[in-house]
Image: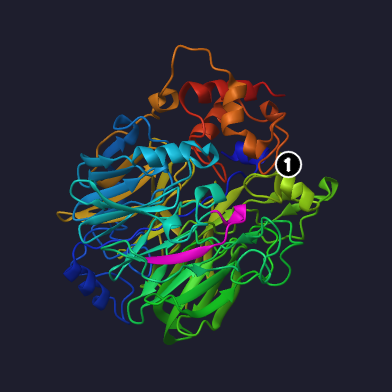
Amino acid sequence: MRRYLKATGSFFLACMVLVGCQTNNKQNNANKKEQTKESNQANQVKETGFPNWGYDFQHTRHVPYKEITKDNVKKLGIVWQQDILEWNQDVPNLQEDFPVVQNGVMYVTSAKNHVFAIDAASGKKLWAWTPPKEVLDHLESLPWQSNVASRGVAVANGKVYVLMIDNRLAKLDAKTGKLEKMVNFWDHVPSIKLENRYYESSAPMYYDGNIYVGSSGGDNGTRGFVWAFKADSLEPLWKEPFWTVPERGTGWAKGKYTGGGSVWTPMSFDPDTDMMYFAVGNPAPDFYDADRKGKNPYTDSIVALDSKTGKFKWASSEVDHDVWDYDAAATPMVLNTKVGGKKQKIVVEGGKNGKWYAWDAKTGKTIYDGVPFVKIQHSTPPSDQSKVKLQWPGTPGGESYAPETYDPDTNYVLIPGINNPNLMLAAKDRKEIAKDNNTFPGTKILPLPEDIDPTGNITAIDVNTGKKVYQIKTDDPMYGGLTSTASGLAFYGELDGTVNALDIKKGKVLWGMKSGGKQIKMAPSIYMVDGKQYIGVITGGTRVVVYGLGGKEKVAAPNKNAKLQGQADVVIDPEKVYKKSCVSCHGDNLQGATAPNLQHIGKSMSKEDILNQILNGGDRMPAGLAKGAEAEALAEWLSKKK
């Protein structure tokens, strides 16, 4: 992975998705009421699953389970593991899915929006849902968007809600997986179409009878939004979306591709006030800013709304005029905590700019104004390639979509960090943007020097003081995020496929185990079934691995069939595969466009490295753009480019 990052830098912008759930109306209402001013969590007495994308409505990713402790954590082993490709060989990948667990059932999603319900204790498949042919055909008609990640579902009142990449919201029966209803966003707002560069990678979020969604595609110049729908009918709750940037041609948004402000990750909610909080992405074009002068509100900001009406409450910017792709990408957390020795309800979030912030939840008043947690050294990206400089952090962050966790016992927030620069090159003028008429207009990223070694870190911040308590280095950038437990442990996965347990108080890793795959790009889901605690991760693109005390299954070998699925005894033209899957980002002559130059990629990467990247993705590049024999042929062809 690191060799790839050195050689090729960044690709497609990771997109985000949210999840939420409860089981029936009584439970939903009870859980909402029990998340009081003294608690950050869902009903801690009754809850045994992982009911929302971030466990509770406030997305603290802190579970009340205590069976796994600092004393027995080394007894963890694999309880069950399941490669989803054994159930459906057409699934591209699910490596950025954040599983929801409710009533002993785990729900996972994949790219192209397949949904699977799995017995959370045994790994047995309960049902699988494939999107209708009309949806899959629509995605295939625009292949540059066909393998975008799907990062989760919402489960509530016996229903499963999932967003389609092509801007639809579907409702399934949670017991059978049967499709009950699906609505098209463009039926309400005609401009929200895949053909206009909009897409959905986020999971929906359920809260108090409604489903909340955010938009993806802001880097393509779309106009970002959040929207609410009634969970029972899927009719809009608000008359129109809350738009995060002006309509093109008005306000600061000038130019053909001007827009941005995606909402990549789930909204957080305060059950006391019904306020919702969400992070807003960068303005577009990314590096070229001639057509978007000024501060570009509400991009790179945290925004608060009344969740029932969509009425604006407050916003606070992390970057007033962004030319580095420094989204506010990660889901904000709502904390009932102590600040300066006094109880206070706050909102916290770490930005891709490498700084961590805290605000008063009611007023938006800044409490901690940008605590750095990675290397920060940047300047305005030039349009002259001879003048490019390393920009720290690069487009991945900072903190990308990977979620933080909060431990109330220590009052620590743990931040997943990425120490990875980019060589950023801005477009010269509008003509150049028009010429690059694909994703990420106005944005080019050049290969990194050989001596750059991207790494990551985990930073603990004392919320009472805003000071860093400790920081531990990780070998790879932290793309997955963390989940903490009431026994003082935080669990996280790494790109090399290792799952770790961290002593939150001491900042010491107590346990680590391989997962049988690589590219863990999600935070663990931790849950209980029949009194036993489980830790679930997704690894290797398509494998679900669940750990528990006394687990004795052997770590499985990487699924070679996954690499070769669909292989046929025919001669494959790798140039045709490249033109179908790669040309829009890497250019028609491998010269690079919105992704790095590949004309000499064989000098720095072997065939095996390239194949792993094609299959598993990484950074901005989605997994599975080519599969099976096509991926093999493409990797062989590219490895000879020296």
Within the magenta stretch, is there residue 221? yes
Left or right of residue 359: residue 342: left
Give the magenta range. 217-228
Quarter of the picture holding the C terminus: top right
Relative placement, left or right, of 277 versus 254 is left
Outermost residue toward the bottom? Answer: 342
> Which sits in the foreground, 327 or 509?
327
Q: How many marks?
A: 1
In this rendering, is residue 130 above or below 167? Answer: above
Tell me how the rendering is colored: rainbow
Q: Position of residue 540 (x, y in %)?
A: 42, 37
181 to 231, vertically: above or below: above
For the question of whether residue 539 can be seen, the reply is no
Q: Residue at x 73, y 60 (%)?
A: 378
Percent coordinates x, y for residue 629 in the rendering: 48, 21
In the picture provided, is 253 more to the left or to the right than 383? left
Regarding residue 30, the answer to whether it shows in the image is: yes
Residue with the most extreme left position? 530
What residue sits right under mark 1 in the picture?
449
Q: Callout 1: helix, strand or loop?
A: loop
